[in-house]
Image: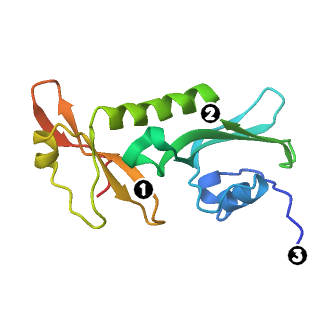
Amino acid sequence: MGRKQKLSIPPGFSPDQTPGFVDQVKAELSLPPSSELKLLSLRTNSHGERVIEYTYSRSVKLEGSEYAAASGVVVDVPSRVSLRFDRDGELVASQLSEVGEGHLNAIKKQVRNLVANGQIYFSKPGEEIDVNSLIAEHKPYYTTHDQDGNLRIKRAFVDSKGIGQARRDPHAHE
């Protein structure tokens, strides 16, 4: 097996112009290769060190009878990555910050409430979602399977300014 290369940055470093850097960060922090890191900030601190922060979502599977038909659903939980490099560009510290138990519990409670209130339409694999039908049924959420076969909950519509006009949620994936 090859030895893991120490992460470093060159002078004038720009993360979006350095091919492969994000993959090196994932390897350094033992993140899954499929993790999508989004640059949050790049700054120099008072000691002349470069600090790079990313956000990413990790997937958590919710299982149990309390989720009823939604048992097995996978939800995304926000996390943060922070890297600190010395003046020579050598990595001196890294930190992976996961959300607290309270935040994860709030997500779990939200899913349980959506199920209990009948607000999720449980679609069949490959089914085309008819947003107008979901509006009529008062089901703003539906299930779908992602590219890895995981059950996901997606928002189908939002109420526009409370006047009953529905529109597609720009983050919903069909």
- Secondary structure found at label 2: loop
Q: Nearer the viewer, mark 1 or mark 3?
A: 1
Q: Could you tell me how far apart the alpha carbons at marks 3 and 2 are, in whole angstroms?
A: 33 Å
Q: Are marks 3 and 2 in contact (CB under 8 Å)?
A: no
For marks 3 and 2, the one nearer the N-term is 3
Q: Amino acid at mark 1?
A: Leu
For marks 2 and 1, the one nearer the N-term is 2
Comparing 136 with 12, the one in front is 136
Q: Could you tell me how far apart the alpha carbons at marks 2 and 1 are, in whole angstroms?
A: 22 Å
In this rendering, would 77 be left or right of 150? right
When asked about the image quadrant of residue 8, the answer is bottom right
At 88% from the left and 75% from the top, the residue drawn is 1
Q: Could you tell me how far apart the alpha carbons at marks 1 and 3 are, in whole angstroms?
A: 35 Å
At 55% from the left and 30% from the top, the residue drawn is 105
**x then y, percent, for residue 10:** 78, 55
Looking at this rendering, what residue extends furthest in the front direction? Answer: 65
Label 2: few (<14), some (14–19) or many (≥20) C-alpha neighbours in 10 Å: few
Comparing 48 with 109, the one in front is 109
| Residue occupied by mark 2 | 99
- Secondary structure found at label 3: loop
| Residue occupied by mark 1 | 151
Q: Amino acid at mark 3?
A: Met
| Residue occupied by mark 3 | 1
